[in-house]
Image (tube, rainbow, N blue to C red):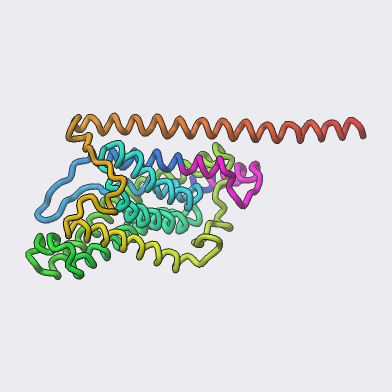
Amino acid sequence: MSSNVAATVDKVRSSLPRSEQLSGPQKLMILVLSMTLYGVGDIVANVVPEVQVGPLELGVSYFAFIAVVLAALLSPLWVALGAPLGELVFSDMLLGDFGGLSEIEGFLQTALAIYVAGCLVRNPLNKVQVALAPIVMVLVDKVSGGVVDILKVVIGIDPEALEEADGLLGAFLLAEGLDIVVTVVFSGILFGALPALWLTPRLYGKIEPVMGLRPRDPEHPPRLTGPAGMQFWPVAVLAVLAAGAIALFATWEEFVGREDGLSTLGAFEPDFVDQFGEAWMWVAGAVALTIGFGIFVVVAVTRSRRARAVVTPTRTSAEDDEASF
């Protein structure tokens, strides 16, 4: 199957013009597609019940395969920006659970995790790379978040977390470690690597031409880079530090009783699920799909018409030149 897919992809790649930079409509299509699919996936993940086994809650935190498959086939950067934005807009806001400026913490962590995972997949037909990408995504996301949670306890602005662990820092660290393991197993493997291994080769070379993109070339894969060509890792460290600072500040405001502090600016929490029941989740998912795919189709049609408008005059000019010759 891999050889047939590779041959088809090479044919598709050769039929599309080489372009090192994405156009504005292409960036917007990737952004909207990742927003829609990841946001709806997050809504569905909230519907999946969790199982309590002792102190552990076994359940899916998010569908990592959605972001990884898109980042492995399309631009990792724009998928990394779109997916967490879709979680905020299409999931948190439609479900009535948007925490305000404090949500930037989760956005930075998720965006960083998806970008690293997407760049890890140099060849979408490489099963090892595709299987590792969701696990790496979960590890980057959960480890960075776990470090921040530990800092909250060490600094002393989140004593409730330590109380839940019977006042023992070691027990709290064990709980954080177990949470990471559970998330890796459920979100990273069961709802990450396994679906990604099945979907990625089947979508490779098929979803990209819709946007006028060349399928990913294993010989020229995307590389981890920061803004304006900066080195990636210093930027990544700054993003993690910024996420940690935001989380610590939000927890401190809650600790001192500032319920309407700066971190809750823009919060939107009417909790529609409590008002209308769990059926509201399916309504929110349908609304998100309708809005997202509606925007995607409009942008795709507009881009296609502009592309034809550019090609037609070129062909006409070439025919006129041949006639005059």
Q: Residue at x 28, y 38 (%)?
A: 44
Q: Residue at x 47, y 65 (%)?
A: 232
Q: Position of residue 29 (x, y in %)?
A: 50, 40
Q: Position of residue 2 (x, y in %)?
A: 50, 48
- Left or right of residue 110, residue 26 in this image: right
- Left or right of residue 57, residue 86 in this image: right
Q: Is residue 206 above or below residue 220?
A: above
Quadrant of residue 165 within the rendered picture: bottom left
Q: Magenta stretch: give its range.
A: 5-31
Q: Position of residue 196 (x, y in %)?
A: 39, 47
What secondary structure characterizes most of the magenta part? helix
The residue most toward the left is 166
Q: Is residue 260 magenta?
A: no
Quadrant of residue 305 within the rendered picture: top right
Q: Residue at x 39, y 39 (%)?
A: 37
Q: Is residue 26 magenta?
A: yes
Q: Nearer the viewer, residue 75 or 108?
A: 108
Q: Count the labels in the image.
A: 0
- Left or right of residue 92, residue 314 in this image: right
- Residue 270 visible in rendering: yes
Q: Nearer the viewer, residue 83 or 215?
A: 83
